Image (cartoon, grey):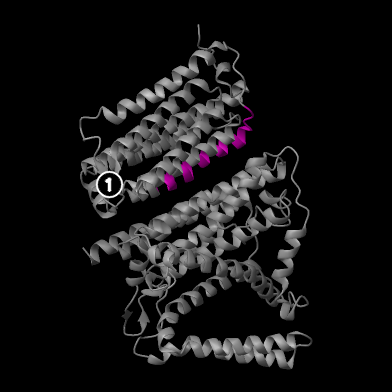
Amino acid sequence: MNGVPISYYLALSGILFGLGVVAFVFKRNIITILMSIELMLNAVNLAFVAFSRALGQFDGLIFVLFVIVVAAAEAVVGLAIVLQVARNRRSLNIEDVDQMKS
Amino acid sequence: MEFVSQHPILVVSVVKIVVLLFVTLTTLAYLTWFERKVIAHIQSRLGPFYTGPHGLLQPLADGLKFMFKEDLTRPGSDRFVYILAPILSFSLAITALALIPFGPGTIRIFGQETSLAIAPVNLGLLFLFAVTSVEVYGVALAGWSSNSKYSLLGGLRSSAQMISYEVALTLSVVGVLLMAGSFDFNSIIGSQSGRWLGFVPRWNVFPQIVGFLCYFTAAIAETNRAPFDLAEAESELVAGFHTEYSSFKFAMFFMAEYASMIVVSCLAAILFFGGWLSPLPHSWAWQLYIPSAILVLGGLGVIVDGLWKLRGVARLVFPVLGLVMIAAGALCTRPGVIGVVQGPFWFLLKVFLALFFYVWTRSTLPRFRYDQLMDFGWKLLLPVSLANLVITAVVVLVVHP
Amino acid sequence: MTLPVLLFFIFAGVAVGGALALILAREPIHSALALVLVMVSLAVIYLLLGAAFIAAVQIIVYAGAIMVLFVFVIMLLNAGEEQRTQRSRMARWIGVPLAVFLTADLAWWVARGVKVVPAAAAVSATEAFSTRDFSLYLFRAYLFPFEITSILILIALLGAVVLARRDS
């Protein structure tokens, strides 16, 4: 066996996605939460590339390219919002950004 | 020897890496000497003169100085990131050299055919850009982890400058990519072989002159060299992002800057000046003796200089060095060696000329102010690179459908 | 244990280690560096899967641009240590085992529940996707999404410039 089974790549993708969800839920800093979203997107990219290779098609890779681009756009806008929140609330703790709670 | 015969690729790769590292580190050291000498002569003075004959031991003295200086650590700095930044800068700058082909074809080391590049990958150009795009971290993290206002500002400015010019750098090269049709360095060089009108070599600098100018300007800005060296110049912001670094860590930043200079010059030589191709027509068979001629003449010059002008130990060392150079020149005329030496000789000559141009620019042009620098990058260089790309694409489409 | 499998385990280990460092780090800058490490090791894994172009794009765009943006914002906002939560500490005692269970569960079912491909199919680390075919596919079959994403980037750029402006 000179290759790596596809299930290994998918298992890694699942683990990284799970760790991304854990980081999203447990962390307090807004920027770290945005980074955990990027981690989840990376895990999904890995799954796409693995499937693309297993099926021998290019569609997975094209999708990965678009996910990277959309993640870039989302990170840019998200960080701009974080900058405004930090200026107004003077804090990067997500527990301080709860004014819309009843 | 069994290990060598069972794992030939591994051993040969390690040999190539060791040779390249040794040559690169020596070149880095003597590049500092070269820069100081050239700037001095442009400014009508002598430069390093007392440490060794013609100041040739100056890099050694600088190295010893860096090693013996007190290694301070700024209190309150983030230790892990503080140590990581210079390591990251230096190792990334050196890594980019692994992709560069120094000559055509293959040579035999320990009986294994191997090419004259450490890692001849299909997407060489793309991976080189990948490596240079991560170099921003070294600068940004150095500025942040030093826990000092000057460093932080210098680091932010410097890294903002690097990412701005990175876009123009990448775009200006795409014209070459369109003309060559491949990311592989050997293909790009191969597409530059041949001549127009019988004697003008088909180098990319002639059709892509705008691309070359954009590339070199963006490269000077990317490597934080004059006239774009606002963030680390002595009269500005103390010393920018490496203010709080001393001794060996500072030396690593220094070496990283010169190593990026070398990488960028190698890339300019490959993409625009035909890499290891010779500018003289192939029919001129005497061009094969040019490397040995230069070595022999250089050796004679060194011998004359040693016996005539120098005193003391140099009176003995220089003539011996000259004899070694003449012997090397004679070796280059042997039939096995003469073919192998051609490619690297022309390549290194072009890289040397690009480095000379770098040093020349440093001593001639005044520095940009930060807002002028940003305006230049975004409002002039980027649109010009884009226009170059569009025009090249249209021409390629029309001429080679 | 052949070379591709060994390489996979090394870089998978680095990726998981980086993700754990992201969770466990106290300073946001360390989390950012850990995420860069994850992205670079994923790029190597893409190389193992034969997608060299995507590996280079991942490093140039993700690790070399998006994460640089994150590092800049952390530096500009001078984000300090993560603070302890003001809410209940019970979350830690129940949460951590649940988190471990979630991760393991996801990994297990994603790895084996796929009916599309036989999960044991092995792929060798050859370069399977050439850049030329990839780009032909992108600019012919997926031309419309490509143009739409360029407009999306323009919108994001404008949005970020407006949102991050100081009220003057």
Q: Residue at x 22, y 43 (%)?
A: A57
Q: Nearer the viewer, residue A69 or A40?
A: A40
Residue B349 sits above or below residue C92 on the image: below
In the image, the segment drawn in magenta is: C57-81
Q: Is residue C163 visible?
A: no
Q: Is residue B236 left or right of residue C97?
A: right
Q: Nearer the viewer, residue C161 or B218?
A: B218
Q: How many marks?
A: 1
Q: Residue at x 61, y 25 (%)?
A: C82
Residue B385, by quadrant, is bottom left
Residue beneath disc 1: A1
Q: Is residue B175 left or right of residue B352?
A: left
Residue C145 sits above or below residue B51 on the image: above
Q: Residue at x 53, y 71 (%)?
A: B354
Residue B75, by quadrant, is top right
**Residue B353 x %, y %:** 53, 75
Q: Nearer the viewer, residue C70 or C129?
A: C129
Q: Per the image, is B214 magenta?
A: no
Main SS, magenta residues = helix
Residue C168 sits above or below residue B169 on the image: above
**Amino acid type indicated by mark 1:** Met
Q: Residues within 10 Å of mark 1 (few under 14, many from 20)?
A: few
**Residue C133 x %, y %:** 24, 52
Q: Is residue A20 visible?
A: yes
Label 1, secondary structure: give it.
Answer: loop
Q: Per the image, is C78 magenta?
A: yes
